[in-house]
């Protein structure tokens, strides 16, 4: 029996967020529900394709490692995201490693099982297309950031992006509850840990960023957005 997840628990613009209740029940009922603790590798770069995961709870990081050992953070994925779908659709080895940032729950399918579900329910295929379009948009924005911004601006733009996508308005500002580290940010924006730490410290000193364990708050997201020169929903 598959797992359950409510619409309010889903990350916006993810695979499950584009599906109705009946399609949720159909899809989640076809897979095997599993949980894994934090710091568990769920997929290895280069491994042959054999399963697809639909996330129900917790956050994971998706990254690649360059030949010289540098880690490049490609994305953070949360409840509602599907992982391993591209490799399953195109039948090639994993292009990235995925590990859990916290305790994570998901529904697991063999690749052929997941593809059978997509063939049986056209709504699943449309949801995959929408999710892919969002990821392509974010990838294009990230490439622009690398070309047009310095490290501090890229850090600001990424924090604003996370706030736009995953933030909740509080009395202090926009709070993002996510186990994100400065090393994760450095791996994502292509800067050194020292440069990222310096940017974060500057934002904190100016009172526009509050950092805490497994969460951060943007007290003035408009200031960071203006500093980065980015448009809403950019990366």
Image (cartoon, rainbow, N blue to C red):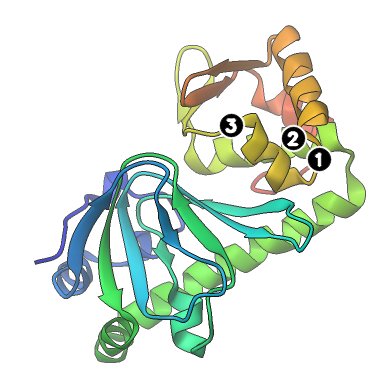
Specify which label sits upstream in the sequence, 2 or 1. Answer: 2
Specify which label sits upstream in the sequence, 3 or 2. Answer: 2
Crowdedness near tag 2: few (<14), some (14–19) or many (≥20) residues, C-alpha within 10 Å: many
The numbered mark at residue 155 is 2
Q: Residue at x 21, y 57 (%)?
A: 34
Q: Secondary structure at mark 3?
A: loop
Residue 217 point in image, percent of width and height: 55, 21
Residue 12 point in image, percent of width and height: 43, 51
Q: Residue at x 40, y 73 (%)?
A: 127
Report the Cα–Cα distance between label 1 and label 3.
14 Å
Please state which of the two labelled residues, at mark 3 or mark 2, is closer to the viewer: 3
Instruction: Name the one closer to the observer, 39 or 178.
Output: 39
Report the Cα–Cα distance between label 2 and label 1.
9 Å
Disc 2 + disc 1, Cβ < 8 Å: yes
Specify which label sits upstream in the sequence, 1 or 3. Answer: 3
Q: Is residue 231 visible?
A: no
Crowdedness near tag 3: few (<14), some (14–19) or many (≥20) residues, C-alpha within 10 Å: few
Disc 3 + disc 2, Cβ < 8 Å: no
Considering the image in quadrants, where does the N terminus appear? bottom left
State the image quarter where residue 51 is shown.
bottom left
Residue 199 point in image, percent of width and height: 79, 24
Instruction: Name the one closer to the observer, 60 or 159.
Output: 60
Crowdedness near tag 1: few (<14), some (14–19) or many (≥20) residues, C-alpha within 10 Å: some
Is residue 78 rendered to the left or right of residue 208?
left
Q: Residue at x 31, y 43 (%)?
A: 37
State the image quarter where residue 28 is shown.
bottom left
Q: Secondary structure at mark 1?
A: loop
The numbered mark at residue 181 is 3
The residue tagged 1 is 191
> Is residue 76 shown above or below 223?
below
Report the Cα–Cα distance between label 3 and label 2.
12 Å
Q: Secondary structure at mark 2?
A: helix
């Amino acid at each position: 029996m598959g797992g359950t997840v409510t619409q309010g628990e889903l990350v916006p613009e993810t695979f499950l967020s584009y599906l109705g209740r009946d399609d949720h029940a159909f899809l989640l009922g076809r897979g095997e529900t599993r949980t894994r603790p934090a710091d568990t590798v769920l997929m290895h770069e280069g491994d042959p394709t054999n399963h697809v995961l639909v996330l129900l709870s917790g956050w994971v990081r998706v990254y690649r490692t360059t030949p010289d050992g540098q880690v490049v953070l490609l994305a953070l994925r949360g409840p509602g995201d599907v992982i391993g779908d591209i490799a399953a659709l195109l039948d090639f080895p994993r292009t990235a490693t995925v590990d859990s940032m916290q305790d994570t729950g998901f529904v697991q399918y063999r690749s052929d099982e997941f593809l059978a579900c997509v063939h049986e329910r056209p709504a699943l295929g449309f949801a995959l297309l929408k999710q892919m379009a969002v990821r392509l948009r974010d990838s294009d924005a990230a490439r622009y950031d690398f070309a047009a911004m310095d490290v501090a601006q890229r850090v600001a733009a990424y924090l604003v992006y996370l706030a736009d996508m995953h933030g909740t308005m509080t009395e202090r500002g926009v709070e993002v509850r996510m186990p994100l580290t400065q090393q994760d940010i450095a791996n994502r924006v292509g800067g050194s840990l020292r440069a990222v730490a310096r940017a974060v410290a500057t934002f904190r000193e100016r009172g526009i960023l509050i950092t805490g364990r497994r969460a951060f708050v943007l007290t003035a997201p408009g200031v960071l957005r203006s500093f980065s020169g980015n448009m809403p929903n950019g990366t």
